[in-house]
Amino acid sequence: MPADKKLQERLVEEFGKRYLDRVELPQYFYTSLSRTLRPYQDECFRYFTTFISEPFEGKPMRPHLLFHMATGSGKTLVMAGAMLYLYEQGYRNFLFFVDSTNIVEKTRDNFLNPASDKYLFAKKIEINGKQVEINEVENFQGANPDCINFCLTTIQGLHTISMWAKRTRKRPTGNRRLCVSSKATRRICC
């Protein structure tokens, strides 16, 4: 498939619009997020889950995904839902980096503060009958393998972490990691 096509176009070409419209999303998209999905978010998740779960010609081995959505359209909720889906796929460690300390605090409220009206998850997060907690960590050494381990930093902090790892030759092992960026590049990388 030509690389110049958008991923959405490539998925429609490969699987067909009817197939994508019939993709059933896991129940936690409706029960473990704090907001009702808008129709375009629902569609985004159908494309996302199809991309992650289905093999197709030209699928990259290490995908870099961009959710290109307007301001106020719910990108952060899409990231929260994507984290739930990827947790189900075996990911446990999520590195979320942003461009300023101010956005770190807003993001912390969105993902980690159930008392905030901006909190993105339901009171109870349940995936396949198992209650899942979100655990804030400073690094992934000793991260809880049953939780969504959420490391939140700035781009500058990410540089500091990577330099420390290089100097000490300590590399995270075990579970796959996911890097998430918001506001700086609006990108989710798997």
Image (cartoon, grey):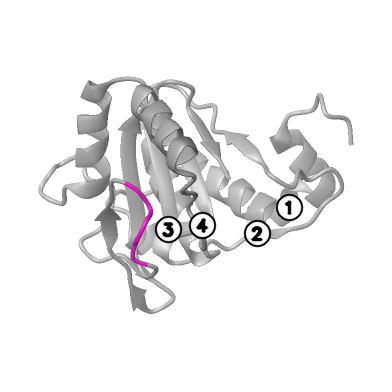
Q: Is residue 158 left or right of residue 3?
A: left
Secondary structure of residue under mark 1: helix
Q: Which mark is residue 22?
A: 2
> What amino acid is labelled 2 in the image?
Arg
Which residue does the numbered mark 4 point to in the structure image?
Answer: 86
Q: Which mark is residue 18?
A: 1
Asked whether the residues under the numbered discs 2 and 4 touch, taking CB atoms below 8 Å apart as contact, a structural biologist would say no
The percent position of residue 136, horizontal first and vertical second, equals: 26, 51
Asked whether the residues under the numbered discs 1 and 2 touch, taking CB atoms below 8 Å apart as contact, a structural biologist would say yes
Q: Mark 2 Cα within 10 Å, few/some/many (few <14, many 20+)?
A: few
Q: Residue furthest bottom?
A: 129
C-alpha separation, residue under disc 2 versus residue under disc 4? 20 Å
Q: Mark 3 Cα within 10 Å, few/some/many (few <14, many 20+)?
A: many
The image shows residue 185, relative to residue 178, as above or below, that is above
Q: Residue at x 38, y 59 (%)?
A: 30
Mark 2 or mark 4, which has the lower sequence index? 2
Specify start and end residues of the magenta stretch as a single range.
139-144
Q: Quadrant of the N terminus?
A: top right
Which residue does the numbered mark 3 point to in the structure image?
Answer: 29
